[in-house]
Amino acid sequence: TRPSWRFLPLLVPVLAAATLIVLVRPLTSSEGREAPGSWGGTGVLEPTRSKGLQPRLDVHRQSAARSERLTDGAHAQAGDVVQLSYTSAGKAHGVLVSVDGRGAVTLHLPETGEAGQKPGHQSAVLERSGTHLLPRAYELDDAPGFERFFFITADAPFALDGVLSAARVLAASPDARTAPLRLPPELGQTSFLLEKPSP
C-alpha cells in the first residue's frame, strides 16, 4: 500500500459521526506507495468514551467525490486509496501491521522515525480516547487475493519484533486470510480484511 494525503480534508467531515480506526505504512518496497498531497488536520475525528468499548480499526476508501466506509471483508482492488483510523478504547500502546496475498508484511504504526523501525523497538503510544486517523492514506498495490490489517493493543509498552515475527509467520501460512496472530495473551488484537478478487 502507498500513502496518500489527497482526500483527507474530504474524509474528516464524513467521518465525524462515525467511529473509526488506524493503520498505514510499508515495511518492504514491494508494498503500496505514497500518493502526493498534504493535510493540516489533527487526526482526531471525534471524542469517544472508552468505557465498554473494544479497540477497533476502520477503513475508508477515498475518491475525488466521496469517502466510503468499508466493512470487514469488503472488495478492493489495486489503485484504491484507503484511509485507516483507530479507536484504542483506553489502551495506551499499539502496533498496526498488515499482511497480503503475496506474503508481504507492512508496518503502519509506529511510523518511521517514531521508533526507528529496528527489531526490538517498542509499540507506539496511542491516543487513549476518541477515533484517530493515521496521518497518511494509502494506495493499494497489486498483491493478489487480500490485504489484512491487524491492530495490536496493550496497557503497557511491548516489543515490536515479536509482532512482526508473528505477522511474517502468518503471512506465509495458507490461513493468513482468517487466522489470528500468535501473540502473548496480554496483547489484544483485532483485524480488518479487504478481499482483492482477480479481475
Image: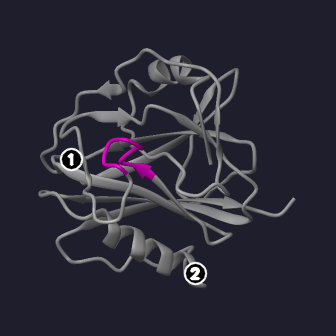
Magenta segment, principal secondary structure?
loop
> Residue 195: horizontal and vertical position, in percent?
66, 61
**Rendered image quadrant of residue 189:** bottom left
Name the side, left or right, on which 25 lies relative to 129: right
Separation of disc 1 and disc 2 at Cα?
Answer: 31 Å
> Within the magenta stretch, is there residue 115?
yes
Mark in front: 1 vs 2: 2
**Rendered image quadrant of residue 145:** bottom right
State the residue in front, 109 or 23: 109
* Residue picked out by circle 1: 89
Residue shown at the point (28%, 65%) measured from the top left:
120
Q: Is residue 149 above or below residue 7?
A: below
State which region is magenta: 108-116
Residue shown at the point (50%, 60%) measured from the top left:
98
* Residue picked out by circle 2: 172
Given the image, on which type of amino acid does mark 2 rest?
Ala
**Rendered image quadrant of residue 167:** bottom left
Name the colouring of the figure. Answer: one colour
Name the side, left or right, on which 156 lies relative to 166: left
